[in-house]
Image (cartoon, rainbow, N blue to C red):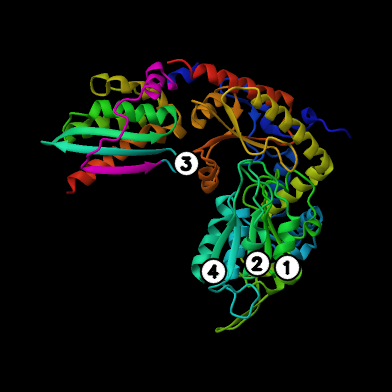
């Protein structure tokens, strides 16, 4: 089957509606959240219609079916990432996945490999989303560990020239994003993973912007933990994924305590179930997990390699078009190597909020603001940017509409 | 086009030629406010003399709506007593909460009635109120002294 965005759009009911007095919906905000295909909406609602029961509890047929559907979804996620099923933990969001790690590290007693103390170091980068920065800032404060980071250069790439002095022998954790949600930059992992493992550090990858858009094999990446969100991958909101290497999950302490994560409980002490149950206290977001399974199957049916090629063709069209306009500054790499379909830019004399509002009047949805990456914006000297993010259902007409809209905004705000 | 209700000429004019911009060297109170959803910032200097606002000046970075709003606000409030300023602010707040049902009292708000269109865009009301909330804060601080 050849890739056909027009045909793909037919699978997404939201494209049947119009925006702002009959305009075609041009949705270029998939970096914030993706739209949902019918198969996902049906999988989620069918769970409630036909199979709803609390998983892993109850000796009845519905409980059996619900458990099968939920565990089936776990299997799909595992296969999608090239991982084993018991390495996949369902959370409520990628934000929770990253916080789970930071809190679990904080729960580690002395002697556990995840225990942090004064003198230890946690390394992040200047391009992190707040969700992969603040948990580590706070963990550093709680444990007395030191927070260090890789800086971002003018072109929007990580400066790895001082890798050995950033990742020191005292470094225990390296947490970084796979693809920047602002710049579109894809970070090179090989050197970072090699240096981190050389000093015995754990590598945590925020893969929110990469997993939905390109083939990912966790074993090939070499990282130790990986987080991504369901709702950016065509799945429902309320479900995120944490993947971790089996041997690490066995040693990692729990974060949330409660039902179904235990092995034995007395009035004074408890022991834990093995992963992934150890990290899934309480009745989970079952219908959402099942919906995510359907989403990932849908993505695989279309084909991640083809999706990536399609997105990069549109990214090239967008970057070329923006570069032809005067007053436009692209915030992030302008070349297409090691980059994804997220393009942020500023326009001279038009604030992103005003540009976003103007584009909205044309039916075009973009993101404006600091994109939850305030330190990065400060580093690059911009208060806010306008961001277009591309997915499989976008087409050339969408990019044309955006470029036409940006040019028209230039004229519109020149009056007055 | 509905967008023209939002970006009226007088708003774009204040955005391009802001009034009372540039912080006064002296002040009784200085406040700094940030719109958390977008990062827009404003700093406001307030000086009172004989119970009246002797000087209200500002500096900031933001969108046309937030910058034009603070520009017009400074023009409206300079020279007023704090009680008069509070009434003007109430009138503006009520206009912003009107969801497009009010035109605004031109006798009180003058050119700032141009912001009536903003009340139809929930995401932008905070922009229009950034400067006013900063003033409210400054007025409370100066009265607390």
* Label 2 or label 1, whichever comes before in sequence order: 1
**Residue A54, horizontal then vertical, whole percent:** 67, 61
| Magenta-colored span | B6-34
| Cα–Cα gap, marks 2 and 3 | 32 Å
Task: Specify few, some or many for label 3: CA neighbours under 10 Å numbering under 14, 14-19, or 20 or more.
Answer: some
Which residue bears the numbered disc 3? B37
A300 sits left or right of A52 in the view: right
A295 or B61: nearer the viewer: B61
Query: Does the CB distance between marks 2 and 3 fall below 8 Å?
Result: no
Q: Which corner quadrant of the image does residue A393 belong to?
A: top right
Q: Please give the name of the residue rendered at 37% of the width and 24% of the height, measured from the top-left corner.
A: B115
**Residue A401, horizontal then vertical, whole percent:** 65, 22
Q: Is residue A28 magenta?
A: no
Tell me if residue A203 comes above or below residue A337 in the rendering: below
| Cα–Cα gap, marks 2 and 1 | 28 Å
Judging from the image, what secondary structure is the residue with disc 4 in?
A: loop
Which residue bears the numbered disc 1? A198
Tag in front: 2 or 3:
3
* Label 1 or label 4, whichever comes before in sequence order: 4
| Cα–Cα gap, marks 1 and 4 | 19 Å
Dot 1 falls on which chain? A
């Amino acid at each position: 089957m050849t890739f056909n965005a027009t045909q793909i759009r037919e699978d997404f009911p939201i494209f049947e509606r119009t925006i702002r007095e009959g305009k075609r919906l041009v949705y270029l905000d998939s970096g914030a959240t993706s739209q949902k295909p019918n198969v996902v909406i049906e999988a989620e609602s069918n769970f409630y219609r036909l199979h709803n029961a609390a998983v892993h509890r109850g000796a009845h047929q519905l409980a059996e079916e619900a458990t099968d559907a939920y565990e089936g979804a776990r299997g799909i996620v595992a296969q999608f990432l090239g991982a084993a099923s018991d390495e996949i933990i369902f959370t409520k969001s990628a934000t929770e996945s990253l916080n789970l790690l930071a809190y679990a590290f904080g729960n580690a007693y002395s002697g556990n490999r995840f225990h942090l103390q004064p003198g230890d170091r946690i390394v992040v980068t200047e391009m992190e989303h707040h969700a992969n920065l603040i948990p580590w800032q706070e963990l550093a404060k709680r444990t007395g560990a030191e927070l260090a980071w890789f800086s971002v250069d003018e072109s929007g790439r990580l400066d790895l020239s001082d890798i050995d002095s950033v990742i020191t022998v005292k470094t225990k954790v390296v947490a970084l994003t796979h693809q920047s949600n602002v710049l579109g930059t894809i970070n090179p992992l090989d050197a970072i993973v090699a240096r981190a493992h050389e000093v015995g550090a754990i590598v945590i990858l925020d893969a929110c912007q990469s997993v939905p858009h390109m083939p990912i094999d966790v074993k090939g990446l070499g990282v130790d933990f990986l987080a991504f969100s369901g709702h950016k991958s065509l799945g429902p909101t309320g479900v995120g994924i944490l993947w971790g290497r089996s041997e690490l999950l066995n040693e990692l302490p729990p974060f949330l305590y409660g039902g179904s994560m235990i092995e034995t409980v007395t009035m004074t002490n408890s022991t834990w179930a093995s992963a992934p149950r150890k990290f899934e206290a309480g009745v989970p977001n079952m219908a959402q997990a099942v919906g995510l399974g359907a989403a990932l199957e849908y993505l695989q049916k279309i084909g991640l390699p083809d999706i990536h090629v399609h997105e990069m063709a549109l990214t090239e069209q967008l970057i070329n078009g923006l570069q032809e306009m005067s007053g436009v500054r692209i915030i992030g790499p302008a070349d297409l190597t090691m980059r994804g379909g997220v393009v942020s830019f500023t326009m001279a004399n038009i604030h992103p909020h005003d540009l976003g509002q103007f584009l909205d009047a044309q039916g075009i949805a973009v993101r404006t603001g600091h994109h939850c990456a305030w330190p990065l914006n400060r580093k690059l000297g911009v208060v806010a940017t306008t961001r277009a993010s591309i997915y499989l259902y976008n087409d050339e007409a969408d990019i044309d509409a955006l470029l036409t809209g940006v040019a028209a905004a230039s004229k519109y705000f020149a009056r007055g | 086009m509905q967008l023209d209700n939002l970006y009226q000429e007088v708003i774009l004019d204040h955005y391009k030629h802001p009034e009372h911009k540039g912080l006064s060297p002296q002040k009784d109170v200085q406040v700094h406010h940030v719109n958390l959803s977008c990062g827009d910032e404003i700093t406001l200097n307030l000086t009172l003399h004989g119970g009246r606002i002797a000087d209200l000046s500002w500096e900031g970075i933001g969108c046309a709506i937030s910058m034009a709003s603070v520009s017009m606000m400074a023009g409206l409030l300079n020279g007023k007593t704090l009680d008069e300023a509070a009434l003007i602010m109430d009138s503006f707040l009520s206009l912003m909460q009107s969801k497009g049902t009010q035109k605004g009292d031109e006798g009180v708000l003058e050119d700032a009635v141009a912001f009536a269109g903003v009340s139809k865009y929930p995401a932008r009301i905070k922009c229009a109120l950034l400067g006013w909330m900063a003033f409210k804060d400054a007025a409370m601080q100066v009265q607390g002294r």
